[in-house]
Image (cartoon, rainbow, N blue to C red):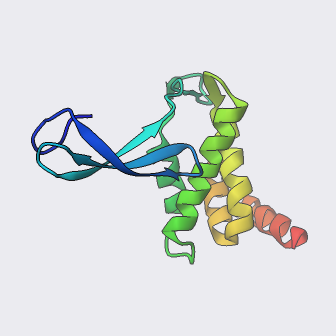
Amino acid sequence: MRCPRCGHAEDKVIDSRAARNDAVIRRRRVCQACGKRFTTYEEVVKPRLQVVKRDGRREEFDRRKLAAGIMRACEKRPVSAAAIESMVDGIVDQLESEFEGEIPSERIGRAVMERLETTDDVAYVRFASVYRRFQDLNQFLSAIEGLIKKQ
C-alpha cells in the first residue's frame, strides 16, 4: 500500500477490525518512511448488479440512489441517519444474496417498503405513493387503512 503523503510502499499495519457488518476490514497503517498514519478498507469485490426497470431499461445498481430515495421518504421524520444507513446495508445485503447479475426494480421497491413499514408509517406511505404510482386519494387511503389493520 502506498503512503498518501510520500508514496513509499512500505508500511506497517497497527490495527485491524471488521466494519460494515463484517463485510469490510478496516486497517490502520503507518508509513515506514515518513510515519504518516492512514486507514485502508479491504472488501470482496462483487460483480456489479444491473437494475431492470419497469420499461425494460437496464442501469447499474447505485447504492447512493437507494439511500437518497429512503432519505427523501424519511425527510422531517424521526428516523436517524444511522437507521437509514443500516436499512440500506440490510437491503443491499439481501439483494446481493438473492440476485446475481440483474435485479428487477420492483424487488428493490418491495424491499424498501418492507423496511419502512416497520420503521415509520409516514415514510412508508410517502415511499409507497411513488413506488406504487398513486393516482388519487383513494389509493392513499387504502395504503393507510392497510397500515392501521396491521397494527
Question: As drawn, is 150 to the left or to the right of 110?
Answer: right
Which residue is depicted at the point 68% across and 61% down?
116
The percent coordinates of residue 30 (x first, y second) are 25, 49
From the viewer's perspective, is residue 63 above or below residue 74? above
Nearest the viewer among 15 and 122 is: 15
Please identify the quadrant where the N terminus is shown.
top left
The percent coordinates of residue 73 (x first, y second) are 55, 62
Question: As drawn, is 41 to the left or to the right of 108?
Answer: left
Is residue 132 visible in the rendered image? The answer is no
Nearest the viewer among 1 and 143 is: 1
From the viewer's perspective, is residue 41 above or below residue 21? above
The percent coordinates of residue 136 (x first, y second) are 68, 58
From the viewer's perspective, is residue 62 above or below residue 151? above
Is residue 118 visible in the rendered image? The answer is yes
The percent coordinates of residue 119 (x first, y second) are 68, 68
Please identify the quadrant where the C terminus is shown.
bottom right
Which residue is depicted at the point 67% across and 63% down?
124
Q: Residue furthest bottom?
A: 78
The part of the image, by quadrant, that contains residue 84 is bottom right
The part of the image, by quadrant, that contains residue 120 is bottom right
Which residue is depicted at the point 68% across and 28% down?
99
Nearest the viewer among 141 and 90 is: 90
From the viewer's perspective, is residue 36 above or below residue 106? below
Number of numbered discs overlaid on the protein picture: 0
Which residue is depicted at the point 88% across and 68% down?
150
Q: Residue furthest right?
A: 149
